[in-house]
Image: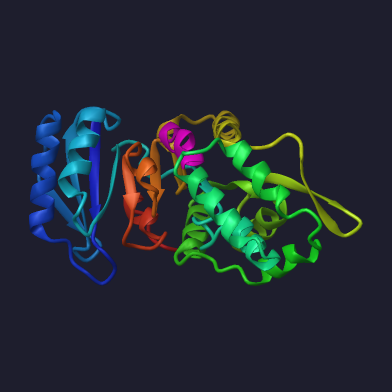
């Protein structure tokens, strides 16, 4: 199988030749065969390195991670075929939007520190997602439901998200927004940016106040994978045609199932289990990984 390692320097920078040389060496150490030359593109900000082998080979992924872990470069390991993806599935909180919406609600309700602590543990994989979500929502019991609209009105869209969704959609790809957070926000963010569909949890409201309970079923990491699988079946495509992006531990199964699963500003546990990361560029870096022109 022909595979590609793509390296991308931070915005307004050129990719250092030494970084590409380190990456070529790392591929060889990891067991890649027939490692080709370095092809620079995007005004020398990015480069492709082609080789023969399995892009999901953990030895190769580990070698690349180790070699460039402290270099200012984003990267992606992926198959050369089906590089332009037909499906994009994205996490919302701290990915498509710049904050954790539940944490923002908690801050306004005066329980921010307690909720943020649970969120951090959940995103790092230290506590079960469903348990963490239930604990955090219970801390909001009795809060006026208007807090949802207040948080949404102050949401910041992550830089590059708008051009990413627009460009993917214009290319013919289906774009889905998935979240372990709340449907109140995914409905609005999906409409604002042009996602084709979205899914998230529903928070229970009674007499204008949050009850502290969730409406079953609770959607977790398994639900994100199920959404990915259902979309692949509907579009009659394989995982090599899927781009997934997220930041937390509950995104890992979705990221590992996709042909291009990208850790966006990922927690250490996420970056350790994925084959692509974006730590320096904005979300439009995902277009560079696909060599897709922005719309």
Structure colour scheme: rainbow
Magenta residues? 249-258
Judged left or right of residue 275, residue 151 is right
Residue 295 is situated, as x and y percent measured from the top left of the image, at: 46, 64
Quarter residue 270 falls in: top left
282 vs 200: above or below: below
Residue 116 is situated, as x and y percent measured from the top left of the image, at: 55, 56
Q: Is residue 265 magenta?
A: no
288 vs 82: above or below: below
Q: From this viewpoint, is residue 88 visible? A: no
Quarter residue 275 falls in: top left
What secondary structure is the stretch in magenta mostly built from?
Answer: helix
The residue located at (56%, 53%) in the rendering is 92
For the residue pair 186 and 249, the one nearer the viewer reads as: 249
The residue located at (45%, 64%) in the rendering is 160
For the residue pair 210 and 72, the one nearer the viewer reads as: 210
The residue located at (59%, 31%) in the rendering is 226
Residue 71 is situated, as x and y percent measured from the top left of the image, at: 19, 56
Judged left or right of residue 141, residue 130 is left
Residue 125 is situated, as x and y percent measured from the top left of the image, at: 46, 39
Q: From this viewpoint, is residue 103 visible? A: yes
The residue located at (81%, 57%) in the rendering is 142
Looking at the image, which residue sits at the far right?
A: 207
293 vs 49: above or below: below
Q: Total label count?
A: 0
User: The N terminus is located in which quarter?
Assistant: top left
């Amino acid at each position: 199988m022909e595979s590609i390692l793509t390296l991308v320097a931070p915005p307004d920078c050129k990719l250092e030749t030494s970084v590409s040389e380190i990456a070529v060496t790392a591929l060889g150490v990891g067991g890649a065969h027939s490692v080709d030359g370095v092809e620079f593109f995007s005004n020398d900000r990015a480069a492709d390195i082609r080789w023969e082998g399995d892009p999901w080979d953990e030895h190769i992924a580990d070698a690349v991670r180790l070699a460039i872990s402290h270099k200012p470069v984003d990267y992606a390991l992926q198959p050369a075929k089906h590089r332009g993806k037909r499906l994009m599935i994205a996490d919302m909180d701290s990915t498509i939007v710049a904050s954790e919406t539940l944490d923002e609600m908690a801050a306004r309700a005066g329980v921010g520190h307690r909720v943020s602590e649970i969120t951090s543990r959940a995103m790092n994989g230290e506590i079960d997602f469903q348990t963490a979500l239930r604990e955090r929502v219970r801390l909001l019991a009795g809060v006026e439901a208007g807090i949802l609209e207040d948080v949404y009105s102050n949401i910041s869209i992550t830089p590059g998200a708008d051009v990413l969704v627009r460009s993917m959609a214009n290319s013919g790809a289906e774009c889905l927004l998935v979240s372990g957070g709340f449907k109140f926000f995914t409905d609005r963010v999906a409409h604002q940016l042009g996602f084709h569909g979205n899914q998230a949890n529903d928070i229970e409201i009674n007499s204008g106040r949050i009850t502290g309970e969730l409406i079953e079923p609770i959607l977790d990491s398994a639900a994100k994978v199920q959404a990915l699988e259902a979309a692949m079946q509907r579009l009659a495509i394989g995982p090599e045609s899927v781009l997934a992006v997220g930041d937390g531990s509950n995104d890992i199964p979705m990221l590992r199932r996709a042909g291009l699963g990208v850790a966006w500003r990922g927690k250490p546990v996420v970056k350790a289990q994925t084959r692509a990361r974006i730590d320096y560029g904005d979300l439009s870096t995902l277009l560079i990984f696909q060599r897709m022109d922005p719309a």
